Image: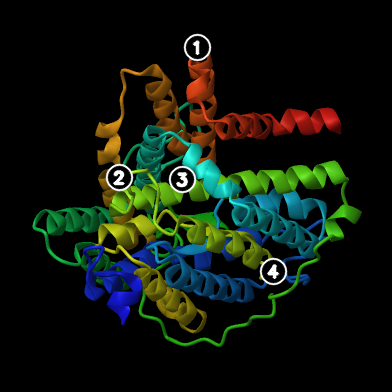
Amino acid sequence: MLDSYFKISERGSTVGREVRGGFVTFFTMAYIVALNPLIIGLSKDADGKFLGGGDAPNLAAIAAATALIAGVLTILMGVVGNFPLALATGLGLNTFVAVSIASQMSWADAMGLVVLEGIIITILVLTGFRKAVFGAVPAQLKIAISVGIGLFIALIGLVDAGFVRRPLAGPVPVMLGDSGTLVGWPIVVFCFGLLLMIGLMVKKVKGAILIAIIVSTAVAIAIESAFKIGPLFDGATGKTNPKGWNLNVPAIPSDVVATPDFGLLGQFSLFGSFERISLVAAILFVFTLLLSDFFDTVGTVTAIGHESGLIDSKGEVPNNNKILFVDSVAAMAGGAGSISSNTSYIESAAGVGEGARTGLSSVVTGVLFLLTTFLAPLVAVIPYEAATPALVVVGFLMMSQIKGLDWADYGIGIPAFLTIILMPFTYNISVGIGAGFVSHVVIRIVQGRRSEVHPLLLLVSGLFMVYFLSSPINTWIG
């Protein structure tokens, strides 16, 4: 029944691979359950209240809602879209909601804007507009998007592990470790995990990525038990320990099960924001959320499709419209659950690297997220340093597609170059996509080849120009 519904054999996979892939995807993105509360849970709204309406942060409730909605939507993606793609609160989007939107209104009003954005993007899917835009993008630019995301997630892995860090001062934006030196046992765990993962992959060991994560976690627990390293940042003292663990401190938990608090669900006001800020400001907020959500997903789906070999001869992904529909519903669900817009996660590529090719892996990942609402202490055992090697390895796999680009054609080569470098350099998928679209259109017009540009690509490039210039436009209007 599983094989028939999910087309497992047809896509050259097995149930075992799908299960392993689901576990790997979960391990590489489970950090969002701990990180999202730190981003939106510690920020006050315009009324001086924390998320949930209280005078003190409620991180446990945010973590529970984050895991619940990620689980439900990821299972929905697997069952409806039959695609190895997991969803959770979008990083970047949650920061934008916390810093730019909630600071000008109540948290309920801010989440109402997220729901509105989700409604609009769902309408775009149902009318076929989102799929049409997807089809209007030249095939080689889709490859560039996939390559750029590969480089981006490799950088995410290196940064989250502390292998690459931002210096406290000086002209260099990033450098090796702490002040140009690799320090601390956590980095040793990361390097060990990366080399182990590479070695297992080279030897074609089944479950290489998952095995490396589990073994590295065991090593990390042993090291922490022996040396008492502690976290990178100690919230109690406010001190930073450059030799500490990033986010999760590996340790065998005293409690395995915790009762979840789902009190945040439904705490949103759909039109309350229009009473707090101007109509134009509200529209710009929704537009920014919409554009980022729209094209992050286009890029992610394209990259996962290429990596899994599911792209057809027309450059399209099977069940594309269903995939985009679930993703659009996720934006609404995130706002309705008060944990910011949910979107597709590029970390799903780690599961694809483990062999996942169908929605069954997404169902496995979703079930693990649902269990996390009760097993949060157990998830905290796995440190970044044990999971992030998977992102570096998958980044390599996705980068290998670069050989399919025609660098001799400036109308492809230059936009591809901008797409690839700007995703990691700006830490934003949409920026790389936008720069690639705009430069492609401009170059084709200069070359006198305007007829080769799809009208929808012209429209989207114009919208991206508005997106890039939103700050001066907002200042001019204000």
Q: Residue 124: horizontal and vertical position, in percent?
A: 64, 51
**Mark 2 vs mark 1: which is more N-terminal?**
2
Q: Residues within 10 Å of mark 1 (few under 14, many from 20)?
A: few
- Say which residue label 3 marks: 299
SS for dot 2: helix
The quadrant of the picture occupied by the C terminus is: top right
Q: Is residue 453 left or right of residue 318?
A: right
Q: Residue 202: horizontal and vertical position, in percent?
A: 11, 53
Q: Quadrant of residue 125?
A: bottom right
Measuring 81% from the left and 51% from the top, which residue is drawn there? 104
Q: How is the image coloured?
A: rainbow
With respect to residue 463, does 117 lie above or below? below
- Say which residue label 4 marks: 336
Rounded to the nearest angstrom, the CA distance separating label 3 from label 4 is 25 Å
Measuring 12% from the left and 63% from the top, which residue is drawn there? 205
Rounded to the nearest angstrom, the CA distance separating label 1 from label 4 is 48 Å
Q: Nearer the viewer, mark 3 or mark 4?
A: 3
Q: Could one spot residue 341 in this view of the protein?
A: yes
What residue occupies the far left of the structure in this picture?
203
Measuring 28% from the left and 76% from the top, which residue is drawn there? 3
**Mark 3 vs mark 4: which is more N-terminal?**
3
SS for dot 4: helix
Tag 4: amino acid: Ala
With respect to residue 198, does 253 lie above or below? below
Q: Nearer the viewer, mark 3 or mark 1?
A: 1
Tag 2: amino acid: Met
- Say which residue label 1 marks: 448
- Say which residue label 2 marks: 398
Rounded to the nearest angstrom, the CA distance separating label 3 from label 2 is 13 Å
Q: Residues within 10 Å of mark 3 (few under 14, many from 20)?
A: many
Q: Residues within 10 Å of mark 2 (few under 14, many from 20)?
A: many
Q: Are marks 3 and 4 in contact (CB under 8 Å)?
A: no
